[in-house]
Image (cartoon, rainbow, N blue to C red):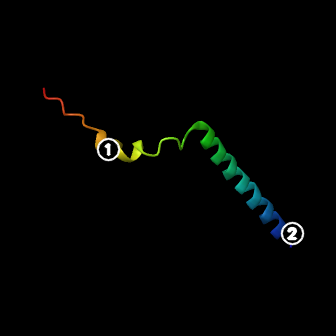
Amino acid sequence: MSIIFFLIGCSILLALGFLCAFFWAQRQGQHDDLYTPSVRILLDDDEPKEK
């Protein structure tokens, strides 16, 4: 029975770790621009340089 309490405690700590990582990413602006990464490949028009 004590292993169940240990596993519940570990899962709560793991969930809190992921929650902290999510809030850190939000504060750092990781999810601000959702449009540009999807069209970046379409906007990349670098012409090859001829020698």
- Going by the numbered disc 1, the residue's amino acid type is Ile
- In the rendered structure, find residue 8 and report the number of the disc placed on it: none
Q: Choose top left, top right, bottom left or bottom right for residue 49.
A: top left
Image: 46 above or below 17 = above
**What residue lies at 13% left-to-right and 29% top-to-bottom?**
50
- Tell whether label 1 touches label 2 (CB within 8 Å): no
Name the outermost residue toward the bottom: 1
Q: Residues within 10 Å of mark 2 (few under 14, many from 20)?
A: few
- Going by the numbered disc 2, the residue's amino acid type is Ser
Q: Residues within 10 Å of mark 1 (few under 14, many from 20)?
A: few
**What residue lies at 75% left-to-right and 55% top-to-bottom?**
13
**What residue lies at 29% left-to-right and 38% top-to-bottom?**
44
Image: 30 above or below 18 = above
Q: Choose top left, top right, bottom left or bottom right for residue 11.
A: bottom right
Horizontal side, residue 41 vs residue 26: left or right = left
Residue 17: x and y in percent read: 70, 50
Element class at badge 1: helix
Query: Which quarter of the rendered picture does the N terminus lie within?
Result: bottom right
From the image, tell me which residue sits under label 2. 2
Horizontal side, residue 31 vs residue 15: left or right = left
Query: Which quarter of the rendered picture does the C terminus lie within?
Result: top left
Name the outermost residue toward the top: 51
27 or 20: nearer the viewer:
27
Q: Choose top left, top right, bottom left or bottom right for residue 2.
A: bottom right
Q: Nearer the viewer, mark 2 or mark 1?
A: 1
Element class at badge 2: helix
From the image, tell me which residue sits under label 1. 41
Horizontal side, residue 15 vs residue 2: left or right = left
33 or 6: nearer the viewer:
33
Horizontal side, residue 3 vs residue 24: left or right = right
Residue 5: x and y in percent read: 84, 66
**What residue lies at 81% left-to-right and 70% top-to-bottom?**
4
